[in-house]
Amino acid sequence: MPGRTKARAAIVCSEFNEEITSRMFSRATERCRENGMAVTATCIVPGAFDIPLFLDLLLSRRDVDCAITLGAIVKGDTDHDSVIAREVASSVVGLSLKHGKPVALGISGPGMTWEQASDRAEEYAVRAADAAMKMTLTLRKMRRARRRNAE
């Protein structure tokens, strides 16, 4: 449906590993347009751990139907990357349920090298944008069906 907005998305992107995440942000924004989604809100945060706070604020907006989270969590010398990835993913799921809005997890890692995260940046961004779109449309269908069944 060219010219018609199918959904309104917010994008929250970590600037840590900016060489990777800036490409993710650009590609996700482009993919949203290709899918007929309007990007109504964006927020760049210092790191992946900061995503949930701002995601919560954006999901409360009426002009946001879904959200896309983007980041690159790269393996270091400790298990810090695993801790960050686990906590962020858990928080993102909780916020999706709290607000009743789909959130796509476009955060690479844990356990990835910088090179692996860089090589997969665009793939993660596209998959996240596609997932946000699909989840939003599916959720709308389910809600419509539920309303019809309740009548």
Image: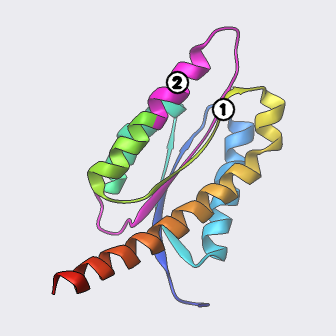
Circles 2 and 1: CB atoms closer than 8 Å: yes
Q: What's under tag 2, amino acid-wise?
A: Ile
Indicate the colouring scheme. Answer: rainbow
Q: Earlier in the sequence, mark 2 or mark 1?
A: 2
Residue 93: where, in percent of width, then height? 41, 44
Read off the magenta span: 60-89
| Amino acid under disc 1 | Gly
- Mark 1: secondary structure: strand
- Residue nearer the viewer, 146 or 129: 146
Res. 29 in view: yes
> Seen in the image, is 73 located left or right of residue 83?
right
* Residue 23 versus residue 19 in the image, above or below: below
Residue at label 1? 109
Work out whether residue 40 can be spotted.
Answer: no
Residue at the (39%, 47%) spot, across then down = 55
Name the residue located 48 percent from the left edge and 65 percent from the top edge.
135
Q: Is residue 106 above or below residue 145?
A: above
Quarter assignment of residue 87 = top left
The residue tagged 2 is 84
- Judged left or right of residue 32, residue 6 is left
**Image quarter hosting the C terminus:** bottom left
Real-space Cα separation, disc 2 to disc 1, in angstroms: 10 Å
Can you give x and y, in whole percent of width and height, for residue 116 in the image? 81, 34
